[in-house]
Amino acid sequence: MALPLVTRLDRYILRQLLAALAAATGALVALIWLTQSLRFVELVVNRGLSLLVFLQLTSLLIPNFVAVILPITTFVVIQFVYQRLAGDRELTVMRAAGLSPFALSRPALGLTALAMALCLVLNIWVVPKSFAAFRQYQFEIRNRMAAFLLQEGVFTPISDQLTVYVRSRDPDGTLRGIMVEDDRQKDTRATILAEHGRLIETAGPPRVLLVNGSREEIDKKTGRLDVLTFAQNAIDLADSTKDDGIHFRDVTEMSLAELLHPDPRQLSNPHDYGKFVVEAHRRMTAPLTVFSFAMVAMVSGLSGTFRRHGGVLRPMVAIGVVVGLLALGLAISNLAARDPDLVGLIWVQAILPGLASAAALYGPMLISGTGALRPGRVPVPQQVGR
């Protein structure tokens, strides 16, 4: 009778791995989310952003957090669970029952395959879409918040280039005594005064209709003050008045196809092409990084001889290897961004440690010709005389 594909022992170890991975990833994601969302607290405290909108905005960053820390948490979980099994002598009993390193590592390999699939989906599809939604939502909030940011008797900075003062606000929404300091035009500062006005809701940035006012500008070339009076004038309260029809997106919100074949209009600097290429290959190699980190943890947990009092040398070496691989990955990415011909090093750095660790763990077993335990061949421990 053949052995089942998944044994009770596999399920026992896999349950511990899955529970630990969910707990570690959830805890780290919550911690990172808390630290990163602090920069948006000012919108809630000082600008009246609702808690629901705050949670909706910051939750769009969570997929990226998971994608970044998943390789690290996979390594930590496999390292922790197998070291605990070794400390409780469970691995010793399993080895005495004839289980090979491959049989012992099957639950970890199953967890690694699941983490690789999740990392692939996140990096290729979910993270770019969530980043694009985040930036769009952030843009809409910053531009549309002007509708309720204006306070009576307060100089309200809508942006670094735009400040609005309103003397009073009527119950029907009419604004009285309006002054606008507009520095959005390059090399030109305009002061706009109006008796009253009203906010206009549009599909784009919020606008305010000014009635019976004047626009004062100083010509820097001649030093002359230019004054233009108007009966009605509408101005927008967006961060910038520039609209060239091109939305320059960050590499994090672009799809894989856009990164590999970027629109020339998106390349404000020809040297940015390397950043596009590096980001594309980083996304494709992220699952391989999960595999490599997991194999390093398995070598640490399943190799070596039994020690009665345990050992910290192998875990510390494994942690040092992973930290070194993370630093090496950053260095290679920076080099490849400057010289796209070096992009192949990203693949080498992602997969070579995993292959080397697999060879170290499974190589002796393959050379000796032994494999997983077969039915009917359970070795019986010999009695040792006193």
Image (cartoon, helix red, strand yellow):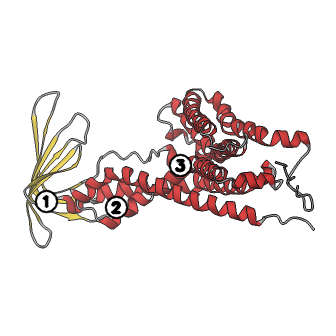
* Residue at screen point 58% across, 34% down: 320
Marks 3 and 1, the one that precedes in the sequence: 3
Question: Does any portion of residue 137 appear in the rendered image?
Answer: yes
Location of residue 309 in the rendering, given as x and y in whole percent from the top left corner = 62, 43
Q: Amino acid at mark 1?
A: Gln
Q: Secondary structure at mark 3?
A: helix
| Viewer-nearest residue: 333 or 325 | 325
* Residue at screen point 72% across, 57% down: 107
In this rendering, would 259 be left or right of 50? right
36 relative to 217, above or below: below
Q: Which circle, 2 or 3, is nearer the viewer? A: 3
Identify the residue position indicated by label 3 in the image: 69
Identify the residue position indicated by label 2 in the image: 54
In this rendering, would 29 be left or right of 362? left
Identify the residue position indicated by label 1 in the image: 151
| Viewer-nearest residue: 277 or 53 | 53
Mark 3 vs mark 1, CA separation in Å: 42 Å
Mark 2 vs mark 3, CA separation in Å: 23 Å
Instruction: Decide: few, some or many residues near mark 2? Use Cα within 10 Å; few <14, some 14-19, many ≥20.
Output: some
* Residue at screen point 50% across, 37% down: 267
Q: Which circle, 3 or 1, is nearer the viewer? A: 3
Instruction: Decide: few, some or many residues near mark 3? Use Cα within 10 Å; few <14, some 14-19, many ≥20.
Output: some
Location of residue 26 in the rendering, given as x and y in whole percent from the top left corner = 50, 58
219 relative to 200, above or below: above
Q: Secondary structure at mark 1?
A: loop
Q: Amino acid at mark 2?
A: Phe
Question: Does any portion of residue 261 appear in the rendered image?
Answer: no
Q: Amino acid at mark 3?
A: Ile
Location of residue 300 in the rendering, given as x and y in whole percent from the top left corner = 67, 42
Q: Which circle, 1 or 2, is nearer the viewer? A: 2
Marks 1 and 2, the one that precedes in the sequence: 2
